[in-house]
Image (cartoon, rainbow, N blue to C red):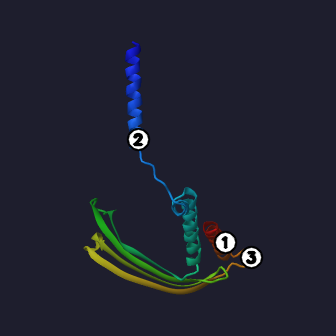
Amino acid sequence: MIIKNRKMLIRILFITISIVSTIQGRVLTYDEAINIALHESYSIKSFQQDKLASQFYFNFYRAMFKPRIDFGLSLPAWNEMVTPIQQPDGLPVYNSTGSMQFSGDLSFTYMLPTGGNLALSSTIYRDNLSAILASQDYKTLKTNKAYSRLGISFNQPIFTANKLRENLREAKYLYEHSSSRFTR
């Protein structure tokens, strides 16, 4: 039994020595160690991500001051309705009413540094209506209506803080703070 334990111990020792001898160590120079610490360490990667996030945050609030164009289009909305009408002879007749609507909006908004905005907007709306009257020998009534609106508006908050400017200053401060933490 002692001989079996010794053989087992020798085998384990031999396997351990063979595994340890196959592992190669790497000797780093001073410059390589500094390079790894500056480019691959967790804290540096964390600072890089923090700087990148604050840069996107700053760019977002800076873009809030750029002019904006908004376009909206309402595709044709078709509505068809059939209404029964009772006749004096007892048999109902059916009137058909239909409508098709189109609309579109276009607006150009310029943000002012004071927190307000100046906007130019236009709306176009078209409505096509048709009705078929069964009680009048299926006479068809049609109407086409079109509306358009052009407007200019000015919006300026008076008794509130300028949130756009405050948010931009905060984002700029966070970006400068994260940049200085990264480059120190």
Whether residues under marks 3 and 2 lie with C-beta atoms below 8 angstroms apart, the answer is: no
> Whole-percent x and y of residue 136?
28, 74
Element type at marker 1?
helix
Amino acid at the residue labelled 1: Tyr
**Residue reaching furthest left?**
137
Q: Position of residue 17 (x, y in %)?
A: 41, 35
Q: Residue at x 66, y 77 (%)?
A: 165
Which residue position is annotated with label 2? 21
Q: Tell me if mark 2 has few (under 14), some (14-19) or many (20+) residues whose alpha carbon lies within 10 angstroms of its own.
A: few
On-image quarter of the N terminus:
top left
| Residue closer to the observer: 136 or 80 | 80
**Residue at image mark 3:** 159
- Residue picked out by circle 1: 173
Dot 1 surroundings within 10 Å: few (below 14), some, or many (20 or more)?
Answer: some
Nearer-the-camera pick, 157 or 1: 1
Under mark 2, the amino acid is: Ser
Chain-order first, disc 1 or disc 3: 3
Q: Which label sits in the foreground, 3 or 2?
A: 2
Between discs 2 and 1, the one toward the N terminus: 2
First in residue order: circle 3 vs circle 2 = 2
Q: How many marks?
A: 3
Give the alpha-carbon distance from disc 1 to disc 3, as whole Å.
Answer: 25 Å
* 1 or 3: mark nearer the eye: 1
- Secondary structure category for the residue under label 2: helix
**Residue drawn 31% across the image and 68% down it:** 95
Contact? badges 1 and 3 (CB < 8 Å): no
Q: Identify whether 115 is placed above or below 42.
A: below
